[in-house]
Amino acid sequence: MGIYVLSLLLLDVLVLTETRAGSHSLKYFYTTISRPGLAKPRFISVTYLDDQQVLSFDSDRESQSTEPRTPWMEVDYWERETQIFREAKQRFQMCLKIMPTYYNHSEEGVQTLQRMAGCDVFSNGSFSRGFYQTAYDGKDHLTLDMETVDWIAGNEGALSLKSQWKEEQSEAKYWKSYIEEECVNQLQSYLDKGKETLLQTDPPSVRVTRHARFNGEVSLRCRAWDFYPAEISVIWLRDGEEQLQETELIETRPAGDGTFQKWAAVGMLSGSEQRYTCRVQHEGLAEPLFLKWEAESSSVGLSAGVITALLLAAVIVGVVIWRKNTSDGKRGSYTTTASSDSAQESDVSLTAKA
């Protein structure tokens, strides 16, 4: 499967970064989609700083302008980016038109050309790593090796363009320079403008729950939610040792309110739950959290309390009905109502025994 999936490039997607605590990343995603029967392909661009979308551009918008996605983005930034995206739109639409020649097929049908470029920096702002990758119709096309400043072809269709760019060398050198210098400067500029939002941390709320499986097995699930930034470690320990191979992990997911959620589960035989501990580490925590599963005895007491209240209510209702029927019996209906009352008292007695 290629490094890109088209849905990941839609405007409302949230891209999770793989940076360490204190580090940051800036990523640009470009997508061009051909539309048979229409004059021009659609061009979409989104810019992410860490896991926050900061800018977007869509050629289908009437304004043909960049839209800021954060309140701290200043006008001069998105006006400059608008000009960059408009030029990129023209280049990508032209490139998409000639791509079929490299793959020996016609221009019929929907085609996509995508690019991801960006950089990571350490907590001190220095360059960590960079990346430049392209995809055609959802499959790897060309990737820039930042060490050798050479192109890696993802398939045979990309070999011809790789040879052309390798001879020229200017394309690879330009992108290496851009990623290591301009991208880093832009990233730092964004951090300075949005530091109050981007550098905040929200610690996770964590809970351990128990779930029955089969054949006497159970699973413990450790769930973390309401945390920011997205990077978090949720690990199960058995007698103090990490259970990486035995743990079922769900990848970190956006909660829809700017925070994230994640859970990890581990299976075991019933009765050995107390040997397991969930360890949670996050930038918002002063120290790691260690949690064990605890039986919710309070819920059992609540159930017993509810049952007692229901029985008491049934007795009171029975007394009220009995008094009413006794009063009615004085007017000649005692025999019938007394029989009904006896049945109700029996029902209450059975309920109490149950």
Image: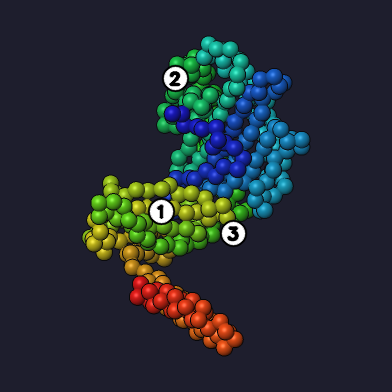
Mark 1 Cα shell of 10 Å, populated few (<14), some (14-19), many (≥20): many
Query: Where residue 323 appears, x then y in whole percent?
Result: 53, 86
| Residue beneath the point at 54% across and 59% down | 200
Residue 313 percent coordinates (x, y): 49, 79
- Per the rendering, the mark at residue 155 is 2
The label nearer to you, 1 versus 2, is 1
Q: Which amino acid, by three-letter code, is at mark 2?
A: Asn
Cα separation, mark 1 vs mark 2, equals 37 Å
The N terminus: image quadrant: top left
Q: Which residue is mark 3?
A: 196
The type of colouring in the image is rainbow
Q: Callout 1: helix, strand or loop?
A: strand
Disc number placed over residue 263 in the picture, else none: 1
Q: Is residue 181 above or below residue 104?
A: below
Residue at the location (47% across, 58% down)? 225
Report the residue at 50% width, 81% height from top: 335
**Secondary structure beneath label 3:** helix
Residue furthest out toward the front: 332
Q: Disc 1 or 3, which lies upstream in sequence? A: 3
Compared across the picture, whether 39 is left or right of 21 comes to right
The kind of residue tagged 3 is Glu
- Counting residues from the start of the chain, the first of labels 2 and 3 encountered is 2
